[in-house]
């Protein structure tokens, strides 16, 4: 006997989620990071442009993509509590979709039903039929509690294990939490620093002196002058690549902390000649361009050294028209000497820029620190050898890890006979610089990346 046909309107046909949908963009960004070890901050802008994502949807795509990458550790702890299998047994594409859905449930204002429904809709476009049901079931379990409720379940109490508690609450690996605690000295400051890492950072621009006035740049870009650097402009949003002054090289995208590092070197008094400057680790060229613009105002020249040819090409592009000569070489083996001022912006773990590089906190490992610290000591030693007697060297890292900062400086001072110089007078007006001659900046204190700056006087 045949079954009677149902009356009423037919069920609408399923339509795939378009590539320009902000959730699809965010999901594809997660997959690019997982599959190709892509850098989110380099991948997303091109993806938004290529797919023609509207201005209104760009903000949501960025928030979902970057936010999910930042919160990965906490999201994984919640999802693990919702599963009947180990988290590493879940296929990568499924896990990334679950992370994206859980992020919307726990850390956005997206209503619960919408977060689950849109995640299931996206799953139909990128996963198999069986996986769609799995995603629906897991996210419904995750929606049973808010973030505070899940943290009470998956994180130990603060008083019992501060590092583990803050690691879950602020989505940082435990070893990074402990490194921040070592640098800051107490758990309250550590919690504030970790929270600042999870805030969406402003875009910082630098008005290159002699090329554009800061007030003119602020007006043209729709931004506001930065509080500390006389060349900084802050933007609340938008694509800096669309600003004419950035496109033609009169300005650049550069964190205000990086600008302060250059100003500490160039603004500290120096006895004797002051015409020959060196940037020992110049790629990709942001600091070299600011050095070159400042050098041009006092008839000085800059040698920019970079080991990697493709990064050296970026330095040449950034410094075009400035008194900067680019050299492809290993800074540890530089033959030229006699420089008056030397900048060593050493390769580091990048733990000070985690808010701008959302995937970096999960990609870096504790084992990365020791070999980088060895390289940093070698570069700083080479910089002192390249400086003339009495010349000034600035050692800079975008990391607050003590093994990459104070330990490197202390070891090189001991072995070379160089003299520590107080960095703080060159940064007058910047608050909470502390009592040490070197300076450690922080997002929660100065609103910059966590840049470390130490000045050393070459022996002789």
Image (tube, rainbow, N blue to C red):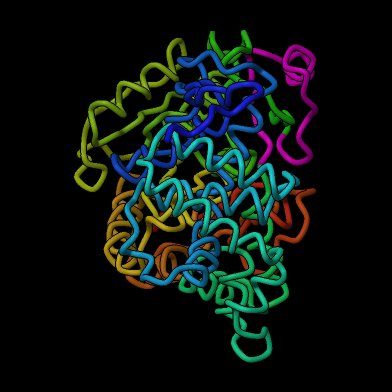
Asked if 6 appears above or below 239 in the picture, the reply is below
Image point 55% across, 42% down: which residue? Answer: 119
Answer with left or right where residue 373 lies relative to residue 156: left
**Looking at the image, which is closer to me, 27 or 420?**
27
Q: Tell me how many marks there are.
A: 0
* The magenta stretch spans residue 213: yes
Image point 60% across, 45% down: which residue? Answer: 264
How far across and how far down the image is residue 7, in percent? Answer: 63, 25
Asked if 231 appears above or below 337 in the picture, the reply is above
Q: Give the range drawn in magenta.
A: 201-229
Viewport quadrant of the C terminus: bottom left
Image point 40% across, 39% down: which residue? Answer: 39
How far across and how far down the image is residue 322, in percent? Answer: 47, 15
Viewport quadrant of the N terminus: top left
How far across and how far down the image is residue 358, in percent? Answer: 51, 47
**Looking at the image, which is closer to me, 121 or 382?**
121
How far across and how far down the image is residue 10, in percent? Answer: 59, 22
- Any part of residue 427 in sight: no
Answer with left or right where residue 256 lies relative to residue 121: right
* The magenta stretch spans residue 187: no
Answer with left or right where residue 186 lies relative to residue 27: right
Q: Quadrant of residue 371?
A: bottom left
Q: Which residue is the extreme one toward the front?
A: 1
Image point 42% across, 63% down: which residue? Answer: 404
**Looking at the image, which is closer to me, 439 or 179?**
179
Answer with left or right where residue 68 lies relative to residue 9: left
Asked if 165 appears above or below 260 in the picture, the reply is below
Q: Which residue is the extreme one toward the bottom?
A: 160
- Any part of residue 33 in sight: yes
């Amino acid at each position: 006997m045949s079954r009677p046909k149902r009356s009423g309107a037919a069920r609408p046909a399923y339509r795939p989620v378009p590539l320009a949908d902000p959730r699809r963009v965010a999901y594809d960004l997660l997959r690019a990071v997982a599959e190709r070890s892509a850098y989110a901050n380099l991948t997303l802008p091109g993806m938004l442009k290529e797919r023609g994502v509207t201005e209104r949807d760009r903000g949501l795509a960025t928030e979902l993509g970057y936010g999910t990458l930042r919160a990965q550790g906490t999201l994984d702890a919640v999802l693990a509590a919702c599963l009947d299998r180990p988290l590493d047994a879940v296929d990568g594409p499924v896990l990334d979709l679950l992370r994206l859905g859980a992020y919307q449930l726990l850390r956005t204002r997206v209503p619960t039903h919408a977060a689950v429904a849109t995640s299931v809709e996206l799953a139909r476009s990128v996963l198999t039929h069986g996986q769609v049901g799995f995603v629906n079931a897991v996210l419904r379990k995750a929606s049973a509690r808010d973030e505070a409720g899940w943290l009470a379940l998956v994180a130990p109490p603060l008083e019992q294990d501060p590092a583990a508690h803050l690691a879950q609450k602020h989505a940082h690996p435990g070893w990074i939490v402990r490194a921040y605690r070592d640098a800051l000295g107490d758990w309250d400051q550590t919690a504030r620093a970790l929270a600042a890492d999870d805030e969406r950072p402003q875009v910082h621009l630098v008005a290159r002196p002699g090329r554009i006035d800061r007030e003119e740049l602020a007006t043209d870009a729709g931004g506001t002058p930065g509080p500390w650097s006389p060349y900084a402009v802050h933007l609340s949003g938008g694509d800096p690549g669309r600003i004419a002054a950035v496109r033609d090289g009169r300005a650049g995208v550069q964190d205000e902390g990086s600008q302060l590092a250059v100003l500490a070197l160039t603004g500290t008094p120096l006895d004797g000649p002051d015409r020959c400057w060196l940037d020992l680790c110049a790629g990709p060229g942001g600091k070299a361009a600011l050095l070159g613009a400042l050098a041009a105002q006092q008839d000085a020249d800059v040698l920019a050294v970079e080991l990697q040819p493709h990064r050296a090409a970026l330095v040449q592009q950034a410094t075009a028209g400035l008194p900067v000569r680019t050299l492809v070489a290993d800074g540890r083996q530089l033959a030229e000497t006699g420089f008056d001022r030397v900048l060593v912006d050493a390769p580091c773990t990048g733990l000070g820029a985690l808010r701008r590089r959302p995937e970096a906190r999960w990609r870096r490992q504790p084992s990365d620190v020791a070999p980088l610290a060895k390289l940093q000591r070698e570069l700083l030693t080479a910089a002192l050898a390249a400086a003339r007697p009495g010349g000034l060297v600035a050692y800079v890292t975008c990391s607050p890890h003590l093994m990459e900062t104070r330990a490197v400086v202390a070891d090189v001072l001991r072995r070379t006979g160089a003299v520590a110089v107080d960095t703080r007078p060159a940064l007058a007006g910047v608050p909470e610089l502390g009592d040490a001659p070197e300076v450690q900046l922080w997002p929660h204190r100065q609103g910059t990346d966590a840049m470390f700056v130490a000045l050393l006087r070459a022996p002789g």
